């Protein structure tokens, strides 16, 4: 059974940075695309960034140039480096398998709050 655990969220001010981590078990990461999603209050969950098994990446327009997704397959971990954070980045962030759509169940997520 796939188990994904997100961490690294917190409360930061506008312009600051955070690095989110997602550790997986029950699956071998290096054979899979991985992605980060987020869900803000009263909004639908959206795909933020994804990375394929060969390193190809994709980002939603609103985070391009500010967020970077990376992976460490030896640690079965995917990261989301978030710079120049804005209040509109406030959301619960989740990781999942798949490049363009979720392929597994959801973890508990990690809360990111950006104050203005």
Image: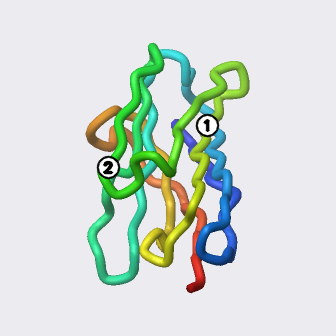
Q: Position of residue 2 (x, y in %)?
A: 52, 37
Q: From what the image shows, is residue 32 above or below residue 10?
A: above
Cα–Cα gap, marks 1 and 2 = 23 Å
Helix, strand or loop at label 2? It is loop
Left or right: 59, with 70 as reference point:
left
Classify 10 Å Cα crowding around label 1: few (below 14), some (14-19), many (20 and above): many
For label 1, the residue is 24
> Going by the image, does 115 lie left or right of 57?
right
The answer to whether 50 is drawn above or below residue 18 in the figure is: above
- Residue 91 relative to residue 6: left or right: left
Residue linked to disc 2: 60
> Which residue sits at x=31%, y=58%?
46
Image position of 78 with respect to 32: above or below: below
Question: Where does the C terminus fall, quadrant-wise?
Answer: bottom right
Give percent across and percent down for residue 53: 45, 18
- Of residue 66 and residue 26, the one placed in the foreground of this image is 66
Indicate the position of residue 109 as horizontal and vertical percent values.
Answer: 55, 61
């Amino acid at each position: 059974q796939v188990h994904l655990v997100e961490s690294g969220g917190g409360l930061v001010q506008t312009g600051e940075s955070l690095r989110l981590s997602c550790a997986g078990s029950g699956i071998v990461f290096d054979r899979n695309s991985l992605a980060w999603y987020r869900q803000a209050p009263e909004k639908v969950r959206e795909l933020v960034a994804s990375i394929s098994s060969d390193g190809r990446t994709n980002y939603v327009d609103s985070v391009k140039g500010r967020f970077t997704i990376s992976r460490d397959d030896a640690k079965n971990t995917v990261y989301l480096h978030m710079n120049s954070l804005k209040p509109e980045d406030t959301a619960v962030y989740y990781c999942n398998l798949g490049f363009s759509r979720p392929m597994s169940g959801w973890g508990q997520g990690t809360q990111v709050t950006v104050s203005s």
